[in-house]
Amino acid sequence: MTTTDTNTNLETRDTSATRPTLVLPKLAPIYDALTPISHLLLRVICGVALMVHGWPKITNPLGATEMVAGIGFAPAAFWSVALSLFEFMGGLFLLVGLLTRFAAAGATVILLVTVYFHWVQLGQGYSGSELSLIWAAATLTFVARGGGKYSIDRLIGKEL
């Protein structure tokens, strides 16, 4: 395996000595087939979810500005536009796997801000921020792994 394979190719099976031996080795082909598909599925779901949350902010900029101001970001108009565009366009980029690491990094930051807001500002703790934590973990996966086999990044052979 090359360095590139081990760092960015989710589909490449790790055959190093540190990998645990499969209890049922005959399942290896199933795992190998599911890996790129599951990566694609998670990326598409994350992308669509971000777009779904970004679109209402784009179509209702006043509401988005009020929401952003309500959680203490100033200037609210700037941050609401940034949030709206990054949620929608970042979601679109994740969906198709273009600039995947960049889009995922932005999404992860947005989600960690929502964790902070729910946990600290609203005092809801883990139960109030659980969903954002799960989504942040999912988007962080794409920061670390890239878009995967079925992405535009892979098609053009370039990624951040």
Image (tube, rainbow, N blue to C red):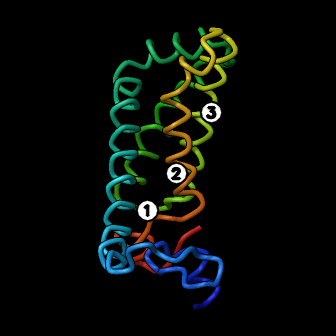
- Percent x, y of residue 45: 33, 46
Residue 93 point in image, percent of width and height: 42, 54
Identify the image quadrant of residue 107: top right
Image: 56 above or below 17: above
Quarter occupied by the N terminus: bottom right
Residue 16 lies, in percent from the top left, at 61, 84
In-front residue for pair 102/138:
138
Q: Residue at x 45, y 13 (%)?
A: 62
Type of amino acid under label 1: Leu
Above-or-below relation of 138 to 13: above
Q: Earlier in the sequence, mark 3 or mark 1?
A: 1
Residue nearest the observer in this picture, 145 or 93: 145
Spatial CA distance of label 2 from label 1 is 8 Å
**Callout 2 amino acid:** Ala
- Which residue is label 1 attached to? 98
72 vs 113, nearest the viewer = 113
Q: Residue at x 52, y 77 (%)?
A: 21
